[in-house]
Amino acid sequence: GAVVSQHPSRVICKSGTSVKIECRSLDFQATTMFWYRQFPKQSLMLMATSNEGSKATYEQGVEKDKFLINHASLTLSTLTVTSAHPEDSSFYICSAREQAGGRETQYFGPGTRLLVL
Amino acid sequence: DQQVKQNSPSLSVQEGRISILNCDYTNSMFDYFLWYKKYPAEGPTFLISISSIKDKNEDGRFTVFLNKSAKHLSLHIVPSQPGDSAVYFCAASARGGKLIFGQGTELSVKP
């Protein structure tokens, strides 16, 4: 299947700092990427839909000024957690939508573990 | 409102036997269904999908069955292997929209 990478895989930061997470589709172009958050023992929670060349669409309850999303190219989307606080500590996962043969499948990155001290 | 439900949080199966993971949905507009496998601290891995025009799709040891009238789909793994132990998520989408995930079922395959 298609490959999606995320960087960094793990990050520890101090409270109040900003953290940028990159999501790349390595072998296909993705006009749409998604950002998820997963809490322990819970399902994936969609945070926002990232569309290349336009503003991201945020899910209800997700602060767009806190979680900045940029989708500058067909293979790269970034999520910046601004002024991070301990409650932002979580596992962040991106996915990229591949359209092939009239079907769409989302392929996920390996995730980024964020710990805010 | 949980549109996609996996009512069994866990399932334990003996190696070599069949694993059956179930998923129910409520939105009749869903037309595409996927199963993902997830290990701890990793992103989900796509396993198999099915569109609403079919009722079965098979790929190796994995078969997905779709019962539209019952709004139910299931993933069969046979024979089950210890390496299949993971959390399995079903997901659904309507007309290429965003994926809606179930809560996941943790499968444990015992040797």
Image (cartoon, grey):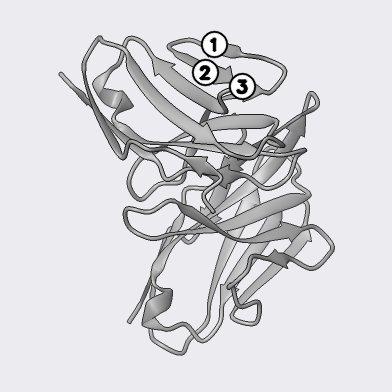
- Amino acid at the residue labelled 3: Ser
Secondary structure of residue under mark 3: loop
Report the residue that reaches farthest toward the left. B111
Relative to A102, is B105 above or below? below
Specify whether residue B70 is in view.
Answer: yes
Residue projecting furthest to the bottom: A16
Near mark 2 (Cα within 10 A), the count class, few <14, some 14-19 or many ≥20, is many
The disc labelled 2 sits on which kind of residue?
Answer: Val
For mark 3, name the chain: B
Tell me how far mark 3 sits from mark 1, CA to CA.
20 Å
Mark 1, residue position: B58
**In front here: B19 or A92?**
B19
Residue annotated with mark 2: B64
Going from N to C along the chain, the mark reached first, 3 or 1, is: 1
Q: Earlier in the sequence, mark 1 or mark 2?
A: 1
Q: Which chain is indicated by disc 2?
A: B
Quarter of the figure with residue B33: top right
Looking at the rendered structure, whether the residues under marks 3 and 1 are on a common chain is answered as yes
Query: Does residue A13 appear anywhere in the picture?
Result: no
Residue A108 vs B32, above or below: the answer is below
Q: Which residue is mark 3?
A: B69
The disc label shown at residue A39, or none: none
Q: Nearer the viewer, residue B73 or B44?
A: B73
Mark 1 and mark 2 in contact? Answer it, CB < 8 Å.
yes
Residue B89, image quadrant: top left
